[in-house]
Structures are given as structure tokens and as C-alpha cells.
Amino acid sequence: MSNRTQAIVFDDRDKITVQEFDLPPCGPEEVVCETIYSFVSPGTELRVLSGIHESRGKFPLIPGYAWVGRVVEIGAEVKGWGIGELVTGRNPLPLPGIYSLWGGQAGMHRATVSGYDSVLKLPENVDPWQYVAAEVAAISWRGVTCAYPSRGETAVVIGQGLIGAFAALWLKHHGARVLVVDLVESRLDRARRWGVTAINANDGDTRERLLAHTAGGADIVIEASGSRSGVDLANQILRQPAARATNSDYRVTRLHSNALYWPRLVYLATYTHKHEVGPGGLSGNAEGVVVLKPGDRTVADRLAAIERIRHDDLPLDDIVTSPVPVEDAPRAYSDLRDHPDQHNTIVFQW
């Protein structure tokens, strides 16, 4: 097995190269995996490429936290794993000599088989292509399930990048009535194909249209845009007590008994500017509002996403249709940044 690997490197702000690195030997409690495809989480990786927030002062670095591959080497103390098994991975062990944020965009990985960053087995005899979005879909799964959606509830998702798109899909899976908001018509068309009501914020009166669709406010609002305007809108469209929002359907009899029946506001984005979030930023009287800011996906969320994909619950063809050779990474990232209306994401083939 080769002890060298290619990796995509963000050398500096908006500067990308593909380089080779030494791959350290497999540790006794590790596996080595050969990447088949790596998936770009656009919001995160373009933010990293721009040099703001978490990447400030960290260049050069290897980005990425979503890849599928096969096991090619097994550590001496690892049990229950076989050569050739397909896996999905998130944060591999870092390559020496370069910063990892989070290191997934590489052709070979050393990875753990237990704990938070472990690789996870895919089902047997599957096409790994179908699972390229599993890691990102798991982030949305966590954001949705932490709100405990009930069948028949009304949910609004602000922002239809991939995190927001998958959130809408999982809300629909849980039986919620889903509305989404975005500025890009192609994203809204995708949501409509998925059976979701879609509103273009460019058309004006967004708040009023959402309140009209939800009979005075939503049971669940997921803010996935990461924008100041998205946060402001989220604070205005939760259902409110009937005494303060005439004709709204506020379930006051449940207010004292179970907080999970209160309206829920989920912040499912990374915010690079300060916002007034939570009860202080809510319009009217925020009595009985549950505010949630879930952390990163857990192993359980990742397993749930794998299972949902196994049952064909994620229409991948609406997200990406073909992989890009890793050698084309500089051009591909530029296209993704400059033409968000034409590209949902990138999948690199290694």
C-alpha cells in the first residue's frame, strides 16, 4: 500500500492546490481507508476558503468532513472489521505537517473505529455513491430531531442550502407540514419537487406570506441561512400566545405540562456576526418558546442518516449528478462560490 496521499489544500484565502503528503503508518487501534468520493459542505468549506471565522490564521489547511471509502488496512488490535468494507467518515486523523480543518478532502485516511470521529460501516453490497451526502444529512437530522417534530405540525426552514434542504426533507419524513424560504429559485424548485411549499424572499412580504400560510405562526422554525435577515425572520414567525397574536393557534392548555409542545426555534447554522437570538430577540411575548442550538452530529445521527439513505429517503440526483476529478478542485470550488444558483455542491472522485 502506498504511504503517500493526495489532498486538497486551501493554501490561502481563495487559493487552492492539490498536493501530496506522507501517510503515517496505521496505528494498532486504527484503520486506513482509501477515499472513493468526498463531499463538499458548501457553506462551511466556502466560509473556510474565504478566511473568516474558524480558518482565520490557519492557512494552509486541508478542509472537509464528509467522505466515503473502503478499508485497505486494519490495525493489529482492531476486531470486527474487514478489508474492503465500505465506510463513511468525517474527521480523520490529521496528516503531519499541515493544519486539518477537518481533513476529509484527501485520498487516504487513518481513522478510528470507535468514539465521536469513528468511521461507520455502510450496508453490504451498496453503491457508495448513494451515501456521499450521509455526513451532511446527519447534521440536518440532528437539527430536526432535537425539536421533536410531531405529525401534522407546521415547520418553516429558512435557507435552502444543503443543511436547510435536508432539514426540510427530514421534517417531511416526520410528518410535518413544511414551508421553506430562500432567495435562489433553483433551490426552491428542488423543494417543490420534494413536496414542500416554497417561498422566494425576493418577492417581498415574506413574513406576511409565511404567517398567512401558517395561520399565524409556525410550530417549528429552523434557521439554516446563517444570515442576519434569517435570524430576524425566524424570531417573527413562531406562533405566539392567543392573547398577543389574535387568531393564532396557541395550545395554552399544554403550556404548563410539556415544553415539547411549545413552539421551537432551532439555529442550525454557523453565524460569523453577532445576532440577537433567543427570547430577547423574539417579537411579542416569547412565553413558552424552546430555543435550540444543536452541536455537531453524533454517531447516532450519522447512523440514522445511513439508514434513511438505505431506505431511499434522500433523492441524491436532486443534489448532485456526477463526481468531479480531484485534479479539477480549484475550478470546481470557484464555480461553487461564483454560481450558487447553478451548483448545489461538489463531489470529488479520488
Image: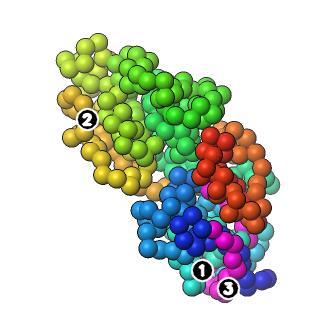
Residue 60 drawn at (x, y percent): 55, 75
Residue carrying label 1 = 95
Q: Position of residue 331 (x, y in %)?
A: 70, 59
Element type where label 2 sits in the image? loop
Q: Main secondary structure of the magenta part?
A: strand
Quadrant of the image occupied by residue 272:
bottom left
Q: Is residue 43 above or below residue 153?
A: below
> Which quadrant does the N terminus fall into?
bottom right
Which residue corresponds to the image point at 30% horizontal and 39% vertical from the top-left?
290
For this rendering, which residue is in front, 65 or 40?
40
Q: Which residue is mark 2?
A: 282
Sequence-first disc among 3 and 2: 3
Q: Quadrant of the C terminus?
A: bottom right
- How far separated are the C-alphas under marks 3 and 1? 7 Å
Figure disc tally: 3
214 vs 33, left or right, is left
Whether residue 323 can be seen here: yes
From this view, report whether residue 25 is shown above or below residue 126.
below
Task: Give yes or no for contact between labels 3 and 2 (Cβ–Cβ under 8 Å).
Answer: no
Q: Residue at x 67, y 42 (%)?
A: 342
SS at badge 1:
loop
- Residue position for label 3: 22
**Start and end of the magenta stretch?**
16-40
Disc 3 to disc 1: CB gap under 8 Å = yes
The kind of residue tagged 2 is Leu
- Find the distance from the CA under tag 2 to the CA under tag 1: 45 Å
Q: Mark 2 vs mark 1: which is more N-terminal?
A: 1
Neighbor class of circle 1 (other Cα within 10 Å; few <14, some 14-19, many 20+) is many
Residue at screen point 51% across, 41% down = 164
Q: Residue at x 65, y 86 (%)?
A: 24
Q: Amino acid at mark 3?
A: Asp
| Residue type of the residue flagged with mark 1 | Leu
